Image: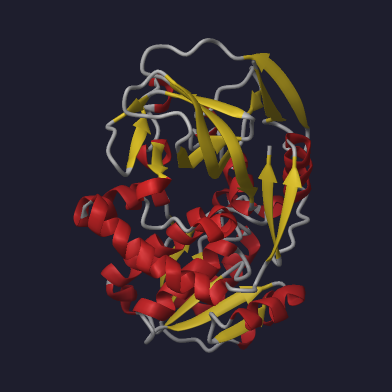
Amino acid sequence: MTITEVHVRKGALTDAVLAEAPLAPLGDGEVRLAIESFSVTANNVTYAVVGDGFKYWDFFPAPEGLGIVPMWGHAQVIESRHSDIAVGERVYGYLPMASHLDVLPGRVSAGGFMDMAAHRQPMSPVYNNYTRLAADPEHDPAREAERMIFGPLFRTGFLIEYFLRGADWFGAEQLVVTSASSKTAMGLASVALQSSPQVKRIGLTSKGNVAFVEASGLYDQVVAYDDLASLPVAPSVSVDFAGNADLLARIHHHFGEALTQSVLVGATHIEARSVFGKNEPLPGPNPQLFFAPDHAVAFFKAHGAEEGGKLVAVAWREFLKAAEGTIAIERHKGLDAAREVFTTMVAGQIDPAKGIVIEP
């Protein structure tokens, strides 16, 4: 049996090729997963852009100079040498852009397990956890595509809102979100609408995406980037998903001391992502990087796995109602399609109205 992987050149992300290799026999306690489906989103581009700095390339090793981009998706157990994991069982979690993945399950429970492979232990446990779909409160067989497309991004949005609400929104009256059409931003806006309706939600987006963002109904106001200066200067929190240093500077200069907190998440504007490379001092607070895995660990430590899972699931279902009809799901067969979609996204050609699902 062979495995097919998409190898991406780390120094030139639009350079990606398919590679095949033989699969080694499973060791004691190991399980082999056949990857059924995964989504390709701007989130995966972010994993590649910051791959070395945040160890995203380290989850699924590749030859020197190359990397395998992590994806979120579903897989089925096709071979097992673990007494508690049966062939045929389905799981959801962090997967390579590939046809198969071998894992070493540990901390096995009815709800899931951790991959205890040695090379994955230095990274956040959030990415090493696999949920067993038979006992997963978020799983809906009819909405598996939506979960792959929105789920990881929604959870980041959920954690951002939880963080801001826990700090009483830093005294802000309004939330200003860049890349408002991005799925993470929409998740944040949805949870803020549910849990913090007193905070005005303002979405910044490109002129071409204004209608799409308005149609979502998740924002109180939607403004094109060019019209940023029209926003009222009031106590505000900004959450930047774009990673565009010039845009971030404009936000800081516009709001000045009225900006009570500046949060950096992800990088959807690849061509202008050098947020930290700017030497000019910005008015207002120093931008703070939000690393979702650390916040996830803290959230589940505070609430416990079961209760925390229920809280996320309730907010997730409400988000699904809001997101209904906002995207058209496109399904593509084969890993060459995954390679093509990913490199197209890296080049900046991302249509927010499409949700891409790959079935290897």
Q: Nearer the viewer, residue 284 or 115?
A: 115
Is there any visible trace of residue 322 in the rendered image?
Answer: yes
8 with respect to 241 (left or right): right
Can you give x and y, in whole percent of width and height, for residue 132 in the image? 39, 42
Residue at image location 44% in from the left, 73% down from the top: 318
123 with respect to 265 (left or right): left
User: Which of the image's four quarters has the C terminus?
Assistant: top right
Q: Nearer the viewer, residue 108 or 327?
A: 108
Residue at image location 47% in from the left, 59% down from the top: 140
In the figure, 81 relative to 211: above or below? Answer: above
Q: Nearer the viewer, residue 82 or 259?
A: 82
Can you give x and y, in whole percent of width and height, for residue 242 in the image? 61, 60
Can you give x and y, in whole percent of width and height, for residue 92 in the image? 47, 44
Which of the colour schemes (rainbow, by chain, secondary structure, one colour) is used? secondary structure
Residue at image location 34% in from the left, 51% down from the top: 296
In the figure, 43 relative to 65: above or below? Answer: below
Q: Nearer the viewer, residue 90 or 121?
A: 90
**Residue 333 picture quarter:** top right
In the figure, 79 relative to 129: above or below? Answer: above
Is there any visible trace of residue 238 in the rendered image?
Answer: no
User: Which of the image's four quarters has the N terminus?
Assistant: top right
Can you give x and y, in whole percent of width and height, for residue 161 in the image? 38, 68
Residue at image location 41% in from the left, 76% down from the top: 192
